[in-house]
Image (cartoon, rainbow, N blue to C red):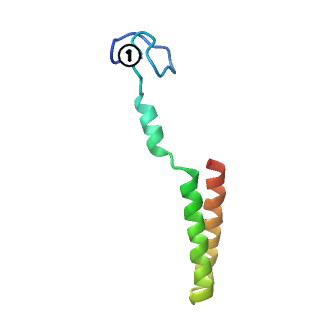
Amino acid sequence: MNCPKCGTPLPEGWHTCKHCGARITRPSDKIARQMTTSGRFAMVCGGLMLLLAGSLFFYGEADMLWQAVLIVLGLLLIFVGKKMA
């Protein structure tokens, strides 16, 4: 890859040009940043699912299957969020 500012050939993995000092942003870096989400977001969603399941258990007369699904998904999201963080 060449520097977009001065055209100097750059080794793979460099983020700044050695010749002119320009920062190099590859399209793959931008895509990777857009595709990732934080582990905190997953943990918050999991916690909200657990709260919803608890409120359905105490205040609602919803089917037990929906409560179990919400609990399992909530715990799964919390687990995945902790692994991502």
Task: Identify the element where label 1 is drawn.
Answer: loop
The quarter of the rendered structure image containing the N terminus is top left
Measured as percent of width and height from the top left, residue 57 is found at: 62, 84
Q: Quadrant of residue 62?
A: bottom right
Question: Number of marks in the image?
Answer: 1
Measured as percent of width and height from the top left, residue 24 is found at: 42, 23
Is 24 situated above or below 2?
A: below
Query: Left of 12 or right of it: where is 78?
Result: right
At 64% across and 76% down in the image, what residue appears?
Answer: 68
Residue found at the very far left of the displayed protein: 5
Q: Dot 1, how many residues are within 10 Å of its Cα: few (below 14), some (14-19), or many (20+)?
A: many
At 56% across and 57% down in the image, what residue appears?
Answer: 42
Q: Which residue is mark 1?
A: 3
Q: Nearer the viewer, residue 23 or 74?
A: 23
Is 80 situated above or below 8?
A: below
Q: Quadrant of residue 79?
A: bottom right
Measured as percent of width and height from the top left, residue 75 is found at: 65, 65
At 63% across and 55% down in the image, what residue appears?
Answer: 80
At 43% across and 15% down in the image, what residue appears?
Answer: 17
Measured as percent of width and height from the top left, residue 21 is found at: 42, 16
Is 43 situated above or below 23?
A: below
Residue found at the very far front of the displayed protein: 21
